[in-house]
Image: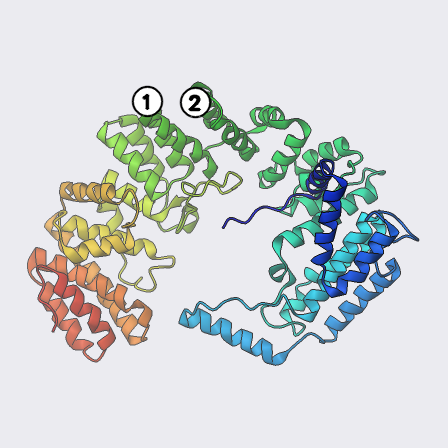
Amino acid sequence: MTKMKNPTYAKFINEVANHISTLSKDDLIEIILTFAESQNSNDRNAFLLLLKNKSKINSKSDGQTSSINMSSEQLIEAIQEFEKRIQNGEFYDEEKSCQAFEREERSYWQDYDDDDIDFSEEEYVTEAIDFLETAKLFFRSQDIETATAAYEMMFDIFENSEYYDDEYFTYGFTFEDTLDADFLKEHKTINLRCQYLRVADTLDFQYVYNRLINEQDLFLSDIIEISRDPLPSLDQFIDGLIEFIGNNPKYDYHLVDVLFIRGGIDEIRKFAYNNGNRHPSVFLYYYESIKEKSGQPDVLKTIFDGIEIIPEEYQIRSYLGLDLIKIAKETNDRNYLTIGYNTAFYSNPTLKNLTYFINHIISKNYISEIEKMRNYLKNKDITNRDSFAYSIENTQNDRNIFSTATAKIDIKALIVGKFLLDGIENLIENINPKYYLGFSGEHKYIAIITALTLQAISKGFALVVVEKLLDHYCLDTQSDEYILLKEMITNRSQEINMSQKNLENTLKRIESLSVNRVAHILGNKLRGGYDSACLLLVACAEVEQYINHSGNTLIQRIDGEFKKFSAFRRPLKTLTASSKILHAVK
């Protein structure tokens, strides 16, 4: 069942008022009686008191509402006492903390999937909830100073990292994680509205700006809608907030919100066209908002405007390219298709985008695009981690238009692109037998190059274990582009010619790398690396057997040297048995 989003305070009150206006006296009596029946025994006196006094929730009486059971001084003192009890370690339970720590360790090392610990009924949590709800009552009664003071004290407690690092609460507990997200957001919203109202006369909103922009799920629209009363000096606040955000695209999600409040989608469009180069997400928000409502000519114009306005370095610019590709395929427009692939790749150079783009320009023999990509890849240093990313945000499946990530080429895309355009010669020199340690770290490029090199040496011949190695380090077997990319690599491998001397030296280098890796992993009993080390070794042996019939000798030597490592010999037996040209290890 989909969870319904709770309405804002203003919408809720207006909805209630609208429904009440349509009800008869008998209907209202029935509703009140039904509500009375649902009251817990502890709430019945308060309910009767509310009826007897005929009080509204926001009416004042000596600075407090009829529903508030303490004065402002008592609330502040109670919160201060609450924090002292935290500091005195009253809520720390050593036994529970040890159990929570052991549970986390067990879950990490043994891959258990235990349910999260439920802290919601702990004394300190229920007390915190009561303080927040009381602060809200003071806000509704227009006592902004008390509400603000109470909220600030409570959020200072919630955000104090010292309380979670030292022995104050059970290990793993935080108020942020325990309290319901909607509940917490409501009180953060009220707190910010209180802060706003305190300085509205002076227009000194700097503190509110700072607090607001650091909240990703709390917006000015929430602050407006948490009460039926209009916010004073709203135009001045909006102008100041836009100036405060400046040219920082990090806060575009707030910028979109305030622009919409100021003038709706037309205001967003105007800003997007004037400032989209510095605020790309504002432009993309406008584009997404009109995409489903406008005709194709308007959508196309907006796409091309966005490609022109948004700097190429932003990954999210690739969304425009992906949408243009879709339109180009529907309309069979080759020019649009080229621009779409170009935009998608250079703004988000993933292996997926590379595959489709390079296949397109090679199949159509677009010389200028091929040379542009060749130069782009040539300027990327495989050994310099600043040039590429080991993993890259999958913006194709998760359209987060407010991402500020900039284009860094995926290491697989970089190496595979070089291979497809220029072959293997310039890549082989990066295979260093000394770099046999973890391929998941900074030397991962060696494993990728090694897999492609073995494929190239075998001239694309279907060697079972070499293909497994290629899948493991270079490809995603579950991806849409897998079959196309595998075919492209195979075809390119068939075109590569290496001198006999270079081929022999390269095989020796790969064999040394493989043997060094096996010796290191088995010598240090790094069980997590047994399978991958064995895969690299057997793939090397498979190519050696194909080229010069020496692969079986390599396998026999390693099997004899590491006979006692039964856990390593299991994948050795499986892989050699799967190969069509190696003898299976018994």
Q: Earlier in the sequence, mark 2 or mark 1?
A: 2
Whether residue 95 sits left or right of residue 90 in the image: it is: left
Extreme-right residue of the structure? 62
Q: Amino acid at mark 2?
A: Leu
* x and y percentages locating residue 510 in the rendered image: 21, 59
User: Answer yes or no: do the residues labelled 2 and 1 have beta carbons within 8 Å?
Assistant: no
Looking at the rendered structure, the kind of residue marked 1 is Thr
- The residue that disc 1 covers is 331
| Picture coordinates of residue 554, whole percent (x, y) | 13, 67
Q: How many marks?
A: 2
Point out which mark residue 246 bears: none
Identity of the residue furthest to the left in this view: 549
Around disc 1, counting alpha carbons within 10 Å, would you say few (fewer than 14), some (14 to 19), or many (20 or more)? few
Quadrant of the rendered image containing residue 254: top right
Quarter of the view holding residue 351: top left
Q: Secondary structure at mark 1?
A: helix
Residue 300 has which mark?
Answer: 2
Residue in the image at 64% along x and 47% along y:
215
Residue 207 visible from this viewpoint:
no
Q: Is residue 524 visible?
A: yes
Give the percent coordinates (x, y) of residue 133: 75, 57
At horizontal 25% and vertical 72% (from top left) the residue drawn is 519
Q: Residue furthest top?
A: 297
Q: Residues within 10 Å of mark 2 (few under 14, many from 20)?
A: some
Image height check: is 155 above or below 555?
above
Q: Say left or right for 31 vs 553.
A: right
Q: Percent from the top left, x then y, of residue 69? A: 84, 61
Left or right placement of residue 206 versus residue 444 in this view: right
Q: How does the figure colour the protein chain or chains?
A: rainbow
